[in-house]
Image: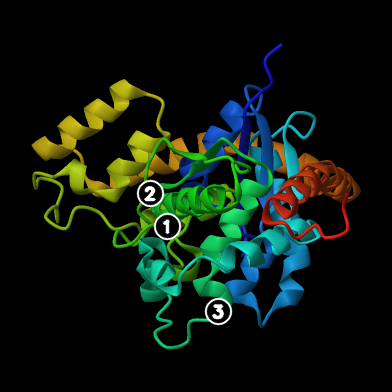
């Protein structure tokens, strides 16, 4: 029997997951979990890059992210959910990678540059924030992942990981696996503000855990085509975030096409289009809400899943670091 290829994917626990996470990575990790040996990393150390002053939030956020994954369909009997801080080998590998990764390459990384801009960090960029692509490279390579499901905005991180792997293997021998990225069903989901990608820090998100009332409220406030002011105005659905959401979450292709036609002709107004979208999103989220309730009523089960998953994952990490140390000739007291 052929050995399954491995997936490493995950989330920073900086709060609840949202629709952007789902289309960017979650949908693919659920779909591929039976086909691959899959590891879902809850990157709590990386969450400290922007939450270093509130570490007390991590305990709840780690569990919330676990529940989000489980509610969306991650099967803990198939996929392995891992807590990053409980794998010290990741930290060790991060340090080794940092020895030959230049500051200039990190400063050039488009993902880092964009996040610095969005968060308005300017001269307040912490060492850990600038270096988190190195940490992510360690996450991926410590498990020798072949494939990494990510959102479009994370592609520069994966490319930097590939560069780090090539440099390591060139310097020390062919030890690490060079991963490939897999972009989600929607490369980048616009936030409800219609200006930026969906981001918790910008407050333009629709959470996977939002109630039906919250969905209706958030959708009603969404930005639409600025050229369509009154119902009879001809719209431009391809420029409208609401239509983008229909294409991402509405399984009724006939409805999507009808919405587009009626918008362009001026027969469909934005209020009615938003009402339709609210119904679509609530239908999409209802089974997720049902699963969420089951897990939220069993908090000990969540902890068991995290503890057992991390134990399993650490065995792989330990093995990889033994190979890394041997390749770098720093396993001084091994025969």
In this view, 64 is above or below 57: above
Residue 135 on image: x %, y %: 60, 61
Residue at x 56%, y 40% (from the top left corner): 26
**How many angstroms separate mark 2 from mark 1 (CA)?**
6 Å
In the displayed orientation, state which residue is furthest to the top: 1
**How many angstroms separate mark 3 from mark 1 (CA)?**
25 Å
Q: Secondary structure at mark 1?
A: loop
Residue 195 on image: x %, y %: 29, 62
Q: Looking at the image, what colour scheme do you see?
A: rainbow
Residue under numbered circle 1: 198
Residue at x 61%, y 43% (from the top left corner): 176
Residue at x 31%, y 42% (from the top left corner): 244
Q: Nearer the viewer, residue 149 or 282?
A: 149
Residue 115 placement: quadrant: bottom left
Residue 188 on image: x %, y %: 37, 48
Which callout, 2 or 1, points at the residue further toward the start of the chain? Answer: 2
Residue under numbered circle 2: 189
Q: Nearer the viewer, residue 138 or 217?
A: 138
Residue 38 on image: x %, y %: 67, 34
Q: Secondary structure at mark 2?
A: loop
Residue under numbered circle 3: 127
- Find out whether the residues at labels 2 and 1 contact each other: C-beta distance under 8 Å: yes
In this view, 134 is above or below 3: below
């Amino acid at each position: 029997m052929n050995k399954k290829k491995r997936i490493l994917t995950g989330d920073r626990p900086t709060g609840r997951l949202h629709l952007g996470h789902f289309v960017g990575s979650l949908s693919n990790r659920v779909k591929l979990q039976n086909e691959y040996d899959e590891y879902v990393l809850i990157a709590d150390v990386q969450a400290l890059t922007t939450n270093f002053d509130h570490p007390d939030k991590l305990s709840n956020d780690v569990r919330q992210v676990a529940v989000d994954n489980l509610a969306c369909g991650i099967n803990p009997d198939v996929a392995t959910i891992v807590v990053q801080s409980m794998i010290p080998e990741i930290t060790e590998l991060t340090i080794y990678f940092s020895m030959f990764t230049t500051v200039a390459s990190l400063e050039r990384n488009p993902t880092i540059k964009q996040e610095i801009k969005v968060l308005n960090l300017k001269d307040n960029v912490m060492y850990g924030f600038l270096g988190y692509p190195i940490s992510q490279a360690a996450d991926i390579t410590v498990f020798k992942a072949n494939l990494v499901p990510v959102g479009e905005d994370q592609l520069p991180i994966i490319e930097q990981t590939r560069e780090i792997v090539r440099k390591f293997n060139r310097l020390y021998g062919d030890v690490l696996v060079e991963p490939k990225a897999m972009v989600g069903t929607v490369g980048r989901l616009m936030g409800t503000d219609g200006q930026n990608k969906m981001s918790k820090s910008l407050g333009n998100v629709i959470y996977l855990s939002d109630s039906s009332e919250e969905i209706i409220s958030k959708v009603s406030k969404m930005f639409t085509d600025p050229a369509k002011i009154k119902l009879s105005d001809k719209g431009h659905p391809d420029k409208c975030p609401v239509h983008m959401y229909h294409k991402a979450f509405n399984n009724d292709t006939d409805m999507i096409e009808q919405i587009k036609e009626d918008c362009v002709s001026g027969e469909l107004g934005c209020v009615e289009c938003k009402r339709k979208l609210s119904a679509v999103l609530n239908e999409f989220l209802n089974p997720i809400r049902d699963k969420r309730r089951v897990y939220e009523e069993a908090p000990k089960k969540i902890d068991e899943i995290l503890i057992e998953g991390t134990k399993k994952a650490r065995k792989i990490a330990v093995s990889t670091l033994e190979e890394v140390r041997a390749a770098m000739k720093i396993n001084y007291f091994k025969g």
